Every structure is written in C-alpha cells, then in structure tokens.
Amino acid sequence: MFPIDSTTALKLLACFFIGSIPFAIIAMMGTGIDIRQVGSGNPGFNNVLRVNKTRAILTLIGDMGKGFVAVWLFHGPGEPQAFAWLYGFMAVFGHCYSPFLKFNGGKGIATSAGVMLVLYPAWAALAMGFFVLVRLAGSRRHWKEAGMIASISTWILFAVLMFALVGDIAGRNALLMTVFLAWRHQQNFRNLFAAA
C-alpha cells in the first residue's frame, strides 16, 4: 500500500467534492421539477431521461465529466496507477454521497464511466459500446431494470478486460468498483428478482 501524504489527501478530498456536484439537479433548474421527487427519485441520468431528454444529456455529460476530470486533473505522471483509481473512487463516492444533497446522491454509473474512460480509453470505448448494445436490446425486449442490467454487465466486462489484458491490480480495482456499483443498485436487483 502506498503512503498517502497531506497533498494526496487534499487531492482525494477535491475529487470527492468534484464528484459531489449534483448535475441532475443543476440540469433541471428552471423547470420547477425536483428530480428527487419524480420517477425513481434518483438524481442521475436515467431518472432525468424519464422527464426530459435534452436535460438528461446535460446530466450525462456533467456526471461523466466529473469522473473524468477528477482523475485527469489530479493524477500526476509520477504517481502510481493505484492513485488514479483512488481519485476515481472518490469522485464516484462524491456522486453517491453528495454533501449538497444531504449525503445522498445517484448510483454512480455515469461518473464511474468517466473514470473508466480516462484510465483506459480504448477498453472503456469497447465496454461502452457493449453497454449501448445491451441497453438497446433491453429496451426493445422490454427487460425489467434494463438500465441496471446494461450498467452492471458492462462493469463486469470491464473488470474481465482488466484482469485479462492489463493486470491484477487494475482487475481488482475494476472488480471492487463493480461490487460497489452493484451494491448501489440493490433495490434494482430486488425489483428484478421480484418480477422473475
């Protein structure tokens, strides 16, 4: 384990606060709609999509962007790759437990996708292509919890790619992210199993 000095600790804190910016709330400003009071109540892309597609795109760009920017901005060239993952995790935690939303938040998929994209862009592009295919298939076949299925299966694929093509450290971090995101979607899993 690499030691975390005061500079790194401040970077981690900054990543958390970048991640905590509630773009779903910001995107809905001026509409009179509190996204936390409609649909699933989740302040994230999928719930905004139920209300307004244009504002959902803005939410997606913002939520992905904060994961990307947090890692891109703070991971220095001399730092271990493990630190890049730490910065990414902190951005995702910020999104999920935003102090601007009384330590509530979204489920972390878009923000984690931004982290994935900056860490390993080629493999992230492949994984995101897979996400689109699964998401479209789920929509056309009317799968219950199609968004969750596409999201978690994409992270499972990404973890497999990390283990197979990058190394054990990247694989373990990707697997840890997958487990955390799956845990954030536990209600979706319950809904899916209840419908089975």
Image (tube, helix red, strand yellow):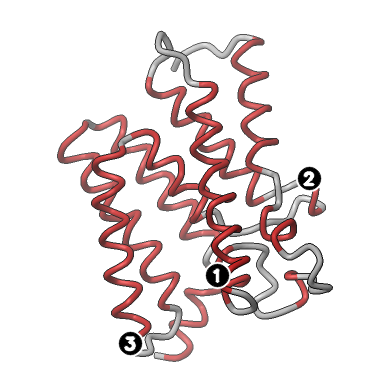
Residue 138 percent coordinates (x, y): 34, 80
The quadrant where residue 157 appears: bottom left
Residue 137 percent coordinates (x, y): 29, 79
Q: Quadrant of the C terminus?
A: bottom left
Q: Residue at x 37, y 22 (%)?
A: 81
Read off the residue under disc 2: 99
Q: Residues within 10 Å of mark 2 (few under 14, many from 20)?
A: some
Q: Earlier in the sequence, mark 1 or mark 2?
A: 1
In this rendered view, identify the residue nearer to me: 175 or 15: 15
Q: Residue at x 36, y 42 (%)?
A: 174
Q: Is residue 43 above or below residue 142?
A: above
Horizontal side, residue 113 vs residue 123: left or right = right
Secondary structure beneath dot 2 equals: helix
Residue lying farthest left?
164
The quadrant where residue 13 appears: top right
Query: Is the C-beta separation of discs 1 and 3 under 8 Å?
Result: no
> CA–CA distance between discs 1 and 2?
21 Å
Q: Residues within 10 Å of mark 1 (few under 14, many from 20)?
A: many
> CA–CA distance between discs 1 and 3?
17 Å
Query: Is the C-beta separation of discs 1 and 2 under 8 Å?
Result: no
Disc 2 residue type (three-letter)? Pro
**Marking on residue 140:** 3
Q: Is residue 111 above or below residue 76?
A: below
Disc 1 residue type (three-letter)? Asn
Residue 84 percent coordinates (x, y): 45, 26
Horizontal side, residue 50 vs residue 135: left or right = right
Q: Quadrant of the N terminus?
A: top left
Read off the residue under disc 1: 46
- Front: mark 3 or 2: 3
Q: Residue at x 43, y 49 (%)?
A: 113
